[in-house]
């Protein structure tokens, strides 16, 4: 692995009033690679992503280390975080409908994001927005610039979001289920764009997903989360050789198209999984 972009040790997150932390003692490093974060609903994947961006002012975030390049994310003031977010670290969410402003044209939103970070004229920001739409393989960028979010498909909306994120050349991108609302062909296009970012621009990508097949094929390494903890960390290509019974249970519960199509096994949970952690 290359020099870590992110180095996290013993990160825990507790929501106000919650009896147990949503994320518990999570440790990992991220290089210029694709790191998958997998686990069932409620295992803490999104909480982990939002905590890294410090997007949860009400929650209690503790860690031994939370270092993003030269920045100590635990000590950084909110002013510094405002400069980092959207510039050097970005997040892509599942559904662009909730991330784009419904009453502003897509292109204007990208141009405005550019002007937030860089001093330039409106015309320069417009040109940059069109260039970015083109970079995410939108065929008629000038036309799409003028569309409102409700006028674009889910896949195009997701590409608009990625275009906005690309503006500032971030080093870290956290993608939270970025393709689950997309059909298979558009999903491939979006994955290809993210893949190019890792290969050509050398970003570090955290890909949060439910989809074991997707992370197996797309990611370099995978963190498996259960009840807020990382129970296993593996190279994606070694996923089928996973040791932890939870990971093995998830793999066994995957539907198969070919071969024996008997009943899917039900995951038998062991309460001990909640206590242990294997970084
Ligand atoms: N804003 C919040 N306030 C209080 N509790 C929350 C909040 N967001 C999430 N939680 C709780 O934290 C735990 C982890 O949730 P989180 O959304 O991180 O899981 P997840 O693995 O991303 O799930 P999903 O795959 O369904 O998105 C859950 O028990 C959830 O109920």
Image (tube, helix red, strand yellow):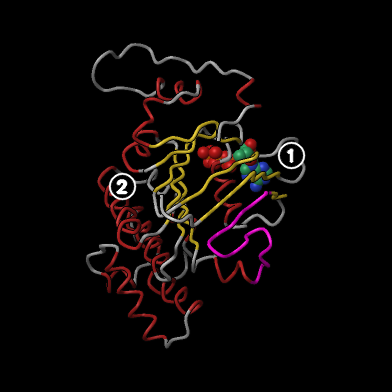
All told, the count of numbered labels is 2
Q: Quadrant of residue 135?
A: bottom left
Mark 1 C-beta to ligand 1 under 8 Å: yes
Q: Quadrant of residue 226?
A: top right
What residue is disc 1 on?
18
Q: Is residue 113 left or right of residue 27?
A: left
Callout 2 secondary element: helix
Residue in the image at 54% along x and 65% along y? 85
Where residue 202 is drawn, which disc sits there? Answer: none
The relative height of residue 134 versus residue 37 in the rendered view (above or below) is below
Q: Residues within 10 Å of mark 2 (few under 14, many from 20)?
A: some
If the image is split into quadrants, where does the C terminus sit?
Answer: top right
Residue in the image at 47% along x and 50% along y? 30
- Residue range highlighted in magenta: 63-79
The percent position of residue 154, horizontal first and vertical second, equals 36, 53
Residue in the image at 51% along x and 32% along y? 232
Residue in the image at 66% along x and 27% along y? 275
The percent position of residue 78, horizontal first and vertical second, equals 66, 67
Camera-side residue of 197 and 279: 279
What residue is disc 2 on?
187
The percent position of residue 130, horizontal first and vertical second, equals 31, 74
Callout 1 secondary element: loop
């Amino acid at each position: 692995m290359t020099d870590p972009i992110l180095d996290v040790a013993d990160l825990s997150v507790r929501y106000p009033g919650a009896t147990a932390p949503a994320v518990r003692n999570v440790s990992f490093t991220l290089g210029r690679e694709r790191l998958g974060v997998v686990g069932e609903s409620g295992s803490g994947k999104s909480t982990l992503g939002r905590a890294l961006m410090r997007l949860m002012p009400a929650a209690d975030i503790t860690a031994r280390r939370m270092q993003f390049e030269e920045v100590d994310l635990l000590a950084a003031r909110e002013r510094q975080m405002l400069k980092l977010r959207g510039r050097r670290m970005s997040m892509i969410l599942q559904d662009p409908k909730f991330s784009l402003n419904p009453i502003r044209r897509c292109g204007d939103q990208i141009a405005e994001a550019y002007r937030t970070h860089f001093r330039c004229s409106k015309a320069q920001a417009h040109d940059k927005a069109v260039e970015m739409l083109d970079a995410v393989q939108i065929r008629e960028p000038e036309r799409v610039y003028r569309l409102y979010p409700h006028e674009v498909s889910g896949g195009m909306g997701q590409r608009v979001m990625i275009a906005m994120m690309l503006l500032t050349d971030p080093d870290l991108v956290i993608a939270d289920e970025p393709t689950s609302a997309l059909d298979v062909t558009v999903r491939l296009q979006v994955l290809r764009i993210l893949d190019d970012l890792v290969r050509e621009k050398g970003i570090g990508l955290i890909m949060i997903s439910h989809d074991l097949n997707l992370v197996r094929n797309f990611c370099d390494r995978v963190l498996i989360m259960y009840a807020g903890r990382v129970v296993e960390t593996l190279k994606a290509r070694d996923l089928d050789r996973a040791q932890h019974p939870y990971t093995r249970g998830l793999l066994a519960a995957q539907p198969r198209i070919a071969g024996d199509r008997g009943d899917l096994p039900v995951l038998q949970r062991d309460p001990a999984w909640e206590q242990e952690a294997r970084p």
